[in-house]
Amino acid sequence: MESTRDIKGRIKSVTNIQQITKAMKMVAAARLRKAEEKAAGARPYADKVGELLRRASANVTGFDSPLLRAGEVKKVGYLVISADKGLAGAYNSNVMKKIVAEISDKDRDSYKLYLCGKQSHNYLKFRGIQEDSYHFGFSDKPQAQDALELAKEMIDEFISGEVDEVYVIYTKFFTALRQQVTMTRLLPIVADAGDTASQDAADNGVQAEPEEFIFLPDANTVLTRLLPEYVQVQIYSSMLQSAASELGSRMAAMTAATDNATERIADLNLTYNKARQAQITNEISEIVGGANALE
């Protein structure tokens, strides 16, 4: 059995770790509320931009844009959004499992990797996989400017023909305890999905009249401006979803660590009391034995 001094040292160490995990839990919980509000606030805007794009493109004929280019897919780009820090449960590992599953059976020349977050960079570097672009420093607090820079890079890569498709891999936020790794196609933009309102009316057996749109200054100018905006909004929404998921995962992980530390401290205290009791019993036995020897 360990000495009481060793057990007390272990209790002190676990207590110090518990204080750290409790503090990290409180910080993550406080930041999660703000991140969740930002993610929820950006989602309607992203949906509305997508709806506007679909409705406008469905009512304009003869419009063409490099961002709508479709054809043979020779090289695919993956924009991977992970965290800069660890201690977030399975958040980073789930993202990495997804990207590894996507590229494991592909030749290195058939894809490009654009990484956001130090954890994905370190993970792939350890496995000998080199990324093509690497960004970090804003995983848990993304700004619109960060999304703008990433959108410009993705658009430039797509227009120049470096990649034929671009997918974004991120973690979709539902609750603090539920997140899901998601992969969606970013480029080329699918803008011919039809009018949502007309489709809903058709589903209900109603003959809907086509809506008329007035574009100022003209349809080409509006859609040319709207398409890059759509890419930026989708990337920014993915970053906000991932940030909320990271903080939610970290809060859950630190909650579990704090609870485990509490249980461990209780077990160590019990062990300490047993060791102390055994020590006292042994000392009493020695005293009684010495007294009997003197008689």
Image (cartoon, helix red, strand yellow):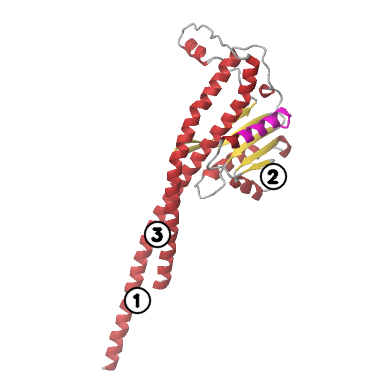
Q: CA distance from mark 2 to mark 3?
A: 41 Å
The percent position of residue 180, horizontal first and vertical second, equals 50, 36
The mark found on residue 130 in the picture is 2
User: Is residue 155 highlighted in magenta?
Assistant: yes
Question: Mark 2 or mark 1: which comes first in sequence?
Answer: 2
**Residue lying at 73% horizontally and 37% vertically, measured from the top left:** 109
Secondary structure of the residue carrying numbered label 1: helix
Q: Quadrant of residue 186?
A: top right
Q: CA distance from mark 2 to mark 1?
A: 59 Å
What amino acid is labelled 2 in the image? Answer: Gln
Residue in the image at 31% along x and 77% along y: 281
Instruction: Give the percent coordinates (x, y) of residue 183.
Output: 57, 33
Task: Judge by depth and name the residue closer to the eye, 233 or 106.
Answer: 233
Task: Say whether residue 94 is visible.
Answer: yes
Q: Amino acid at mark 1?
A: Gln
Select label 2 or label 1 by which is in front: 2
Label 3, label 1: how far apart the Cα atoms are: 22 Å
Q: Quadrant of residue 165?
A: top right
Q: In the rendered structure, are the residues bearing label 2 and label 1 in contact, judged by CB atoms less than 8 Å apart?
A: no
Q: What percent of the width, then of the height, locates residue 89?
A: 49, 47
Amino acid type shown at disc 3:
Arg
Instruction: Name the residue that disc number 1 marks.
Output: 279
Residue occupied by mark 3: 264
> In the image, which residues are magenta?
148-163
